[in-house]
Amino acid sequence: MIPDPVLDSGDESIYTLRTTAPGPSGALPLAAEKLRAMSSGDLFGWTQNAGMGWNPARMLGRQFLVLSTQGGVRAPDGSPIALGYHTGHWEVGLLVEEAAKTFSAHGAIPFAGCVSDPCDGRTNGTVGMLDSLPYRNDAAVVFRRLIRSLPTRSGVLGVATCDKGLPAMLMALAGTPDLPTVLVPGGVTLLAEEAEDTAKVQTLATRFARGEISLEHAADMGCRACGSPGGGCQFLGTAATSQVVAEALGLALPHSALAPSGAAIWRDAARRSAHALMELEKAGLRTRDILSPDALHNAMIAHAAFGGSTNLVLHVPAIAHAAGLPRPTVDDWERINRTTPRLVDALPNGPRHFATVQVFLAGGVPEVMLHLRALGLLRLDARTVTGRTLGENLAWWETSERRTRLREKLRLLDGIDPDDVILAPSRARAHGLTSTVTFLRGNLAPEGALVKSTAIAPARIGPDGVFLHEGPARVFCSEDAAIAAIKHGTIAPGDVMILVGLGPGCGMPETYQITSALKHMRGGETVSLVTDGRFSGVSTGACIGHVSPEAWAGGPIGRLRGGDTVRLRIDTRTLEGSVDVVSLAAEELAARAIHPDLRLDPRVPADTRLWAALQAAAGGSWGGCVYDVDRIAHLLRLGHSSEKDSAGTIGV
């Protein structure tokens, strides 16, 4: 009788068993006085180390923890045994291995743990996006708990990339002020030859539904977009921007952001990062010595110069909060973006749209910072994980063989002049590169909104640098309804799409499938989008997000109706503008009820509803969607006190 494979395999080898084994050989290197003072946990930790096969004679080395966002299971030849959620975490285990071997070679003891991360590209347009931003806080908490759960560690190396895993890792390292920490960016994927990039392929379904591409084209391009199996996307979205910010903060080694995943230069960064962490530990330098107001300033300057993702407006304040530093305000972002020119021509901003790996070869973060140094915009005394200041790092980079050889490599491989990828300020102005983010006000956004003004199609901007659009509102109370309207061709040129109910109250999901569809569909450049939600870092066009107060908080955006006339004004030079309804008075708008189609999404998980309540109490989206424990505890005490008073009154 053939056995049921679920109940019994029929494999005789499974009955080869034993209940005892000799255990590890050797003996722990215990000294009498040390043993008397050891906690049971420290002693049992040594026992566990020996049980996992660590040589007892090497038990006295300093211990370093390597945390990562590794996902999936790779065979030694790189083939998949179990897929990860995305390419960004598929190969980072190789970086963990390189770092661990480096620690071991120097007599230290490496430990490793991981918290994998989701893919915003995979969850866009799905219920999974309701967990995306809340995941960041959860992962940061778990990372910090893992750090504290190894009380004998001397330092922490974080290996991460992609949209939420890397910000979570940065929050965790920032929240570990009394240890030395170093961040190893997980790198980027290569461009695929004769294929669409990983941003554009996400619009295949919309373009096919509109009859703009063939089924064969969709099948071909959808298969071939990733040029290599590992690394973050090829564009300067949230993943790549977070790598740039990590390096600009001084938490990652110079020229480590945006390295091609799997390459020797990428592995080398992990080895050197491990060495840097050991040197920091020897020198007594800790994370609090690296993360400072000057470091935050430099990170925000770099963000503006690169034209980075607007999602960093959420993540940088969260990193600052974790480090115990003042969180940057909207005024700070406005000031930085007004004073900092954009110097990088990369996907999705353009104008020529180079890939992130090409930005790396052109010199990456330190090359951009040479220009920023010349403009006097950087705080060069900020200390970094090299043990040196930013100014000292840049002095090395300027005359380094690495800089010369890699920039020449870009010419040889792709025929690209690196000075066309990272431009001097005068050339950037001549090529029409404008500053990154404009913060808006107006009667639809009394507490603010933002737009990635650098990504508005140049043809839509007047000779005075001003984008103007006045048109009828098309109101959608769900992302599904909005994308259906685009696919069915019912959005007309000149419309202003209003997408409400996607703010922090439901997890603040990205709306990239909407913004990408508008970018790549015919005529989409004439349509604007206004939402209380957020965008992917690769979004382009006249897309205004983070409108506050959100609809769920009673914001005026939730009172709009189809046919209301909305006016958008964005000055890409002065970085100011407005978003207003102009067909009725503000008082009339305020008297309206919330849109009748606005309903709480029953799919929002309880975990996300808890996140929404906690981050709202701690400053909301402009404050980084963080958990401010002291404020939350204070509000809970007030609530408990009020509840008791109410109960007492009722009892009387």
Image (cartoon, rainbow, N blue to C red):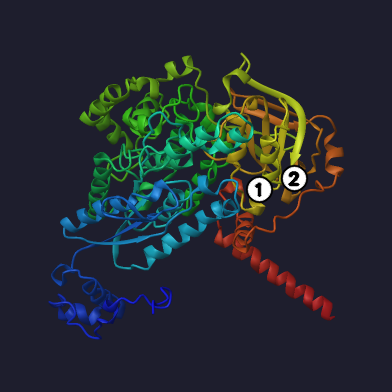
Crowding at dot 2, Cα within 10 Å, few <14 / some 14-19 / many 20+, comes out as: many
Relative to 39, say whether 584 is above or below: above
Instruction: Please give the name of the residue rendered at 27% of the width and 40% of the height, measured from the top-left corner.
Output: 263
Instruction: State the image coordinates of residue 272 (x, y, percent, origin top left).
Output: 24, 46
**Snapshot quadrant of residue 589:** top right
Query: Mark 1 and 2 residues: CB-CB less than 8 Å, in contact?
Result: yes
> Taking the image as drawn, is residue 191 in sight?
yes
Instruction: State the image coordinates of residue 427 (x, y, percent, origin top left).
Output: 43, 16
Residue denoted by label 2: 555
User: Is residue 645 found left or right of 212 in the rendered image?
Assistant: right
Q: Nearer the viewer, residue 260 or 340?
A: 260
Disc number placed over residue 503 in the picture, else none? 1
Tag 1: amino acid: Gly
How many numbered marks have been drawn onto this rendered protein structure? 2
Camera-near label (1 vs 2) is 1
Crowding at dot 1, Cα within 10 Å, few <14 / some 14-19 / many 20+, comes out as: many
Instruction: State the image coordinates of residue 418 (x, y, percent, origin top left).
Output: 34, 22
User: Is residue 86 found left or right of 103 in the rendered image?
Assistant: right
Relative to 388, say whether 574 is above or below: above
